[in-house]
Image (cartoon, rainbow, N blue to C red):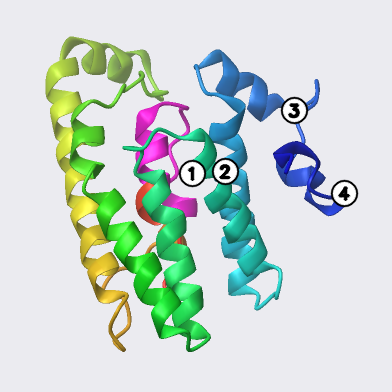
Amino acid sequence: MSFMTTNMSAQPIWGFNRNDAEWRIAKQAGWARTDLMWERMMEAANRAWAAGEPAARRKFVVADLLARSCFAKNDPRRATTAAALAVIAASRGKKRAAGAAQKRALSQWQNAQAFIDGMEIRPRSRSSLFHLRMETRHRDTFHSNLRLRFSRIAQETQESLEALGTDQPLPHRHFARWKGEKPTVYDDTRKMLGSCLLFPEA
């Protein structure tokens, strides 16, 4: 299956053309097309799920195929699509499928901390030259604090993944936080936060 030509309705998600400013910025930062494709598809799938659209599951399945085909085996984004499929399967009463997806998500999530430890952290856009200079001067401290924050978010995701197999609501919000937390830079922090947040709560 070609990810770029799945169908015409997917073009706004998969499409990349010379006028795609976001892709140009992401490419200059070192992202591959599949990085942005996955993020766009997961955003679209979550919006569709929140709106109750039947196509939501298909979008998550395609994103899962993309992650498993194109991302490294230790990439935590592979856990995120598995988690989404577990949520959907559970909502449809398919306990066996939900359990299998949850098991895969938890197995993949074991790589999350190693990914955080090795993250490439690019400079943030700052509102003033003073803040930019402070970030540059105290880069090690800034990076350490950022990794600590991501470790805490990753722990919350771990707790939600463990709760997927129960009848209780997930203990933390995920996609509902994405819009407010989404980094403006295209680096590993954005990939990691997407891993933590780009799946539905219920």
Q: Which mark is residue 136?
A: none
Q: Is residue 89 visible?
A: yes
- Quadrant of the frame with the C terminus: bottom left
Give the quadrant of residue 28: top right
> Disc 2 marks which amino acid?
Leu
Which residue has dot 2 on it? Answer: 66
First of labels 2, 3 by sequence position: 3
Instruction: Point out the stretch of residues depicted in magenta.
Output: 178-194
Asked whether the residues under the numbered discs 3 and 1 touch, taking CB atoms below 8 Å apart as contact, a structural biologist would say no
Cα distance between the residues tagged 2 and 3:
21 Å
Using the numbered discs, state the Cα–Cα distance from disc 3 to disc 1 in whole angstroms: 25 Å
Residue 192 percent coordinates (x, y)? 35, 40
The front one of 173 and 15 is: 15
Residue 176 picture location, percent across and down: 45, 64
Residue 80 sits above or below residue 39 on the image: below
Task: Evaluate whether residue 202 shows in this view.
Answer: no
The image quadrant that residue 165 belongs to is: bottom left
At label 3, which amino acid type do we have?
Asp
Which residue bears the numbered disc 4?
A: 8
Q: Return the residue at label 1.
A: 68
The magenta stretch spans residue 44: no
Q: What residue is at 27 percent from the left and 68 percent from the top?
A: 160
**Neighbour tally class for label 1: few under 14, some 14-19, many 20 plus, Cα within 10 Å:** some
Tell me whether circle 2 and circle 1 mark residues in contact (CB < 8 Å). yes
Q: Is residue 179 above or below residue 142?
A: below
Position of residue 15 measured from the top left corner of the image (x, y, whole percent):
77, 36
Which amino acid, by three-letter code, is at mark 4?
Answer: Met
Residue 93 percent location from the top left of the image = 48, 89
